[in-house]
Image: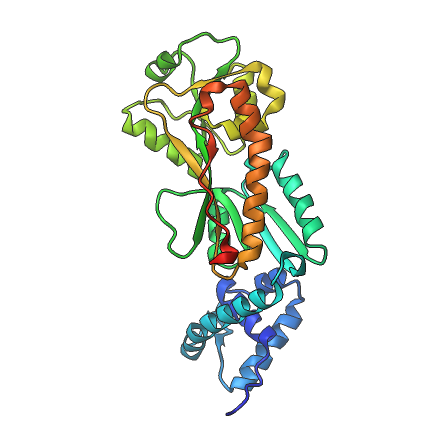
Amino acid sequence: MKKTRLSLKWLEIFLLITRHGSLQAASEEAGLSISTVSHHLRSLEDELGVQLFDHKRRPIRLTSEGSIFQRNISEAMRLIHKAETEATTENVSQTRNLKLALIEDFDSEITPELARSLIDSMPNCRFQHLTRPSHDILELLKNNDIDIGVATRPQFPQPDLNEIPLLRDPFVMILPATNDTPPERLLDDPSTLPLLRYNQNQIIGTQIETQLRRLRISQPVQFEFDSNQTLMNMVAEGHGWAITTPTNFMRARRFHRQIKLVPFPGKEFARFISVFTTDLCAPQILTAINQTLRNLIQSHSISPMTQKFPWLRDQFNLMPDDTDLTKS
């Protein structure tokens, strides 16, 4: 049997270049100089005896030989990384690398405590944490740029990803504390007080708009915000009302005295937050993070919110947990 002399580093660099179409972008993600990336690629092409890219085009493109090689090597590298992960993470403390992305909804208390827990349980791990919108987190997972993502479940299933349901986060209404307008009137009469929206590029924004259309509620699109804190500030200052969730409300503690939280009138609806991963992630790590998150969400979000707003008890809760993946 002929032994291959191809370097794994060459192959990883090759796949980065095919993804980005640029040596510079590949070098930035790999943390290497452009000359080093170019050297790895040239070494791979020399060893194979074929040109994998048309270097005269910008962005550079795969040759026909490169396309054939890419199709075959992508699956091989996926299996190699999976084997490496499983072999080196028999227990969580042996974890060497972990890339984790969470939505900003947990930034104030839950994410810092999760990070401290991971540092304690994975002392030799190179830990990278990202905060991104849900749609960006799902894309990062599909590109294998992160190991685990915590995000809002999108409208359509994600067949390339594994999902562990985490939290049911119901939609509620918030309005200025000094405003006594009945919630039903705010929905029916746009002239009473304007609706402040989440940006519709975000999953939470599209979910709210979809529900309003189902209920045949028409509100002019005038104000949209990417930032939850900005939206809460605008409501607190009396500039409008909004549809949000208990998790987002919980993050805006400094505005709580200026904001009134009430049930959404009529048929209730909710978003669902899940833990997403690919099959490259070690089950032990996934189970540990899922269980830690559940404990933190219960103590920092659900318990204080349901104590203050008892009407949330049947709506705001953790999803059933049968996710001890180490036994599967």
Q: Nearer the viewer, residue 38 or 146?
A: 146
Rendered view: 212 above or below 194:
below
Q: Which residue is drawn at 66% across and 61% down?
A: 94
> Percent position (x, y) of residue 117?
67, 45
> Percent position (x, y) of residue 290?
54, 46
Q: Which residue is drawn at 42% across and 42% down?
A: 153
> Residue 234 sits in which quadrant?
top right
Q: Which of 271 and 88 is in front in this view?
A: 88
Q: Which residue is drawn at 45% across and 77% down?
A: 69
Q: In this view, does 109 lie to the left or right of 160?
A: right
* Whether residue 277 can be seen here: yes
Rendered view: 39 above or below 111:
below
Q: Is residue 149 left or right of residue 124?
A: left
Q: Residue at x 30, y 22 (%)?
A: 217
> Percent position (x, y) of residue 10?
58, 75
* Whether residue 229 can be seen here: no
- Colour scheme of this structure image? rainbow
Q: Nearer the viewer, residue 38 or 312?
A: 312
